[in-house]
Image: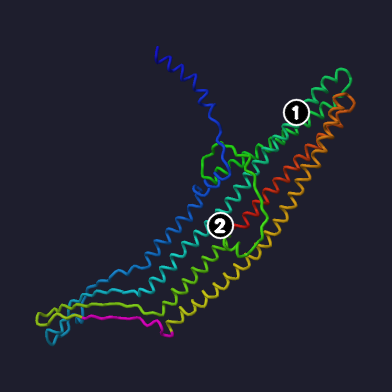
Amino acid sequence: MLHINKLGALLCLLPSLVFGQSTPTLSLDAILQRIDSANIMLQLYGLKAESYRYSADAATGWMAPMFGAGTFMTPYPFQKLMDGSDKGSLMFRAEQDIPNRAKQQARKNFIASQANIELASRAVTLNDYHAEAKRLYYGWMIAKQRINALRQNEKIMATMKKIEELRYPYNQSSLGNIYKIDARIEENRNRISIQEGEIDRSRAWLNTLMNRPEEDFDIDTLDMPAFQPMIHDTALLSEVRGDVLRIDESIRSMQLNIQSTQQEKKPDFKVQLDHMHAFSPMMPKTFSVMGMVSIPIAPWASKTYKSELKSMQLNVEALEKERSAVLQESRGRLSGLQYNILHAQKRILALENKIIPSLQKSLDVNLLSYQENKLQAPVVIDSWEALNMMQLDLLDEKLNLYQTIVEYEKEIYR
């Protein structure tokens, strides 16, 4: 009986446990942080950077020693030998290349600099993902506002439909008005369905960017984008733009490669040890030690690295030109986006403070006259449609403003 009572209590609590779990609400900052830490594509850059660090460590390693064995000055078979020294020797050889330390260090510095380029590329990709997440987030926010506005306006049509149905038996309304109101209600519901689909699409893509399963969540509708006009100084942009920082890292890497190539004029070394064990017991054991050094300054050898140096120097100049062009174009785009934002804010203020209030008053007056049976339904429907469309236009303007702010921020940190 005790077990039965416990089971009954658990069954009673189960609905509250299931339905009592609220949908989590994620702020924009939480989404951006999750993208930074969990996005799979961004993790790729970190792995590449780490691989360059290991490659840089490998650049200071030495070549493996070489060991060989064979015969030395051994006559072919069936040859006539004059004495025991003609029998030759069994030979053992060991070789070791000794690299130039300055060359290795310069090569290591160049390879290690490739990691910084990957991290700068990660910053560029992260900025793109953040901008995409903001666009989806603000699109979701505006879709919820559209749904609220459409549902609120639908109540007016529902009220009018009830009034028309009550008046129809007394020949104070026409069947056409009822069908017209029905059409407006269904059209309104279709618009709501479109916005719900937009929310589902935004949720799915945000889940993908955050590398989380297809879980339901809501957003904080108080996360409104803020905009502050600023002076677009190329010196400031060069410190924050990811693509400029990537170009800077590429220039540094190319300069390190130039330094590494300049080290090619320095020699490399090799040590070789030979040991000969004569086949004749009358002959002594002998050895040979040889040290070798390369001569890279020879004209036929220096041509290669001299040409490479010239090529890399031209590449550095090209990167510097690209850097200047990026900053100049960015300043122009930012100025254009800033003007778009300022004009969009003026249009929104006009819609909110003048146009929509006037349309709302017109609808209120017409609706009051309609309820007093002094006005026909089509006039009220026209007023309702004008207000409904203007409210949606206002939300479209807000969305355009938010998206322009996102593009402005993306351009700053691109």
In this view, the residue in front, 188 or 155, is 155
Quadrant, the N terminus: top left
| Mark 2 residue element | helix
Mark 1 belongs to which amino acid? Lys
Neighbor class of circle 1 (other Cα within 10 Å; few <14, some 14-19, many 20+) is few
Q: Residue at x 46, y 55 (%)?
A: 46
Which residues make up the magenta segment? 288-299
Check the image and report above or below for 286 versus 340: below
The residue drawn where x is 46% and y is 65% is 113
Mark 1, secondary structure of its residue: helix
Q: Quadrant of residue 86?
A: bottom left
Residue 399, horizontal then vertical, whole percent: 69, 45
In the depicted view, which residue is nearer to us: 148 or 364?
A: 364
Based on the picture, tell me whether residue 292 belongs to the magenta stretch.
yes
* Kind of residue indicated by mark 2: Val
Query: Where on the picture, by quarter, is residue 369?
Result: top right
Measured from the top left, where is residue 222 in percent x and y?
63, 40
- Residue situated furthest left in the rendering: 282
Which residue lies under the disc numbered 2? Answer: 124
Left or right: 402 in relation to 278? right
Which residue position is annotated with label 1? 155
Report which quarter residue 84 is drawn in.
bottom left
Asked whether the viewer can see residue 161, the reply is: yes
Using residue 362 as the reference point, say whether residue 261 is left or right of it.
Answer: left
Q: Residue furthest bottom?
A: 82
Evaluate whether residue 205 shows in this view: no
